[in-house]
Amino acid sequence: MTEALPQTAAETSAERPWPVRLLSAKIKDQVARMPSVWVEGQVLNLKRWRQLFFLSIRDVEEDVTLSATLPADAVGSLAEPLTDGARIVVHAKPSWWLKSGTLQLDGREVRAVGLGELLARVEALREALALEGLFDDSRKVPLPFAPRLVGLICANQGDAEHDVVVNATQRWPSVRFEIRRVTVQGVNCVPETTAAIRDLDANPDVDVIVVARGGGSFEDLLPFSSEALIRAAAACVTPLVSAIGHEKDTPLLDLVADLRASTPTDAGKRIVPDAVEELRAVVRARAAVRSAIEVRLDRESQALLSQVTRPVLVYPERLIDPHVAEVRRAHAATGHAFGLRLAAFRDVLDGLVVTLRALSPQATLDRGYSVVRKKGGDIVRDAVVLNPGDRIAMRFAQGSAEGAITTTVRD
């Protein structure tokens, strides 16, 4: 007897697995329980077989695709023929194909996404991103003055690459380009352009990134208003230039970019300086500096000449002439005052000399007296201290003498 298969996924094991047919059947049962749903996307690979249209519906922001079918009468009711790249909204029931193991949408109704609705969605996205501050001027960074390596994102074919490269190299011949060629419209535009921005931003040698496209219709430029692309541009550290070339409508990439160029040609002119004009500016600056130096030197020379020709420098002794007379007068006055002062001191000194002389022992000697000293030097004031035979020294007004005591008389 054959062993019964597990009823639930939890009951399966390596020893008791489900066969593929059973798993596919169970998925089919689960999908069948799903309700019908409205799905929006972009048409790819549209084909008709009898009364059915087979197509893929791709997410416009991410690279996710689902197969779908639409009845021919539903497609025929559209105002415009359905083509690849069109944006549609489909009311469909998910279904599971057992043998191929694929999910498919069985469409019942289809509506084209009109231009007005697309504009409204872009405007709603613009307002939402603006509230986040992604378009603020404070986030924008200036472009380098003379980038050495420019990252260029452009179409595989077209004039945008030529316009940017030629105009930039004509202005600044030393500039180099790192080019990433991508699809610039349709379903692959967003993922390829986003990947190119991230790749160039990761290159430390790239000084500025230019996203260039040569204009187009609003529908063609819708990828450049994609939220995924805008967020990738906002996260870019390298200065980014948007050169989509569409004046009537502004793609959101223009708002988040650090610089918006009106066309690829304009971008080529704005990302680099004009070497000829810069050289002219250098020449003008050198001339201006030379002229300023010459004017300054002339002014300083005139000022110096005016100084050295002043009488005070030509005849400097005239500065001291008035002071010489004053010094002479002061010198004479000082001498006179000193003489008077000296005379006064001389009179005082003379009086002191007279007084000193009056009190001096010499004055006494001059009057006829003499001074007697014993041999030891003591002055003799009383004869009693002398004995016959003592040696004495006598001082007179003029000269001196020595002698010996023969006799003493006491009063």
Image: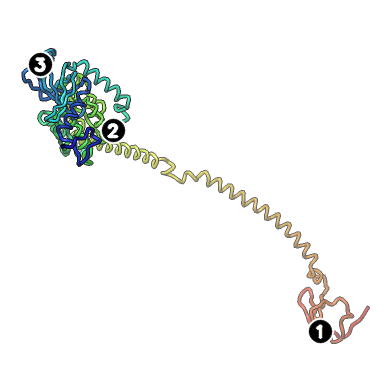
User: Looking at the image, is mark 1 or mark 2 earlier in the sequence?
Assistant: 2
Give the residue at mark 1.
391
Identify the mark nearer the N-term, 1 or 3. 3
Relative to 260, is 288 above or below? below
How far apart marks 2 and 3 lie (CA) works out to 53 Å
Image quadrant containing the C terminus: bottom right
Q: Which is more foreground, mark 1 or mark 2?
A: 2
Q: Is residue 314 left or right of residue 352?
A: left
Picture disc at residue 72: 3
Judging from the image, the colouring scheme is rainbow
Residue underneath mark 2: 141
Q: In the rendered structure, which amino acid carries the disc numbered 1?
A: Arg
Q: Position of residue 403 (x, y in %)?
A: 81, 84
Front position in the image: 404 or 279: 279
How dense is the environment of label 2, judged by Cα within 10 Å: few (below 14), some, or many (20 and up)?
some
Quadrant for the N terminus, please: top left
Question: Crowdedness of circle 1 by 10 Å Cα count: few (<14), some, many (20+)?
Answer: some
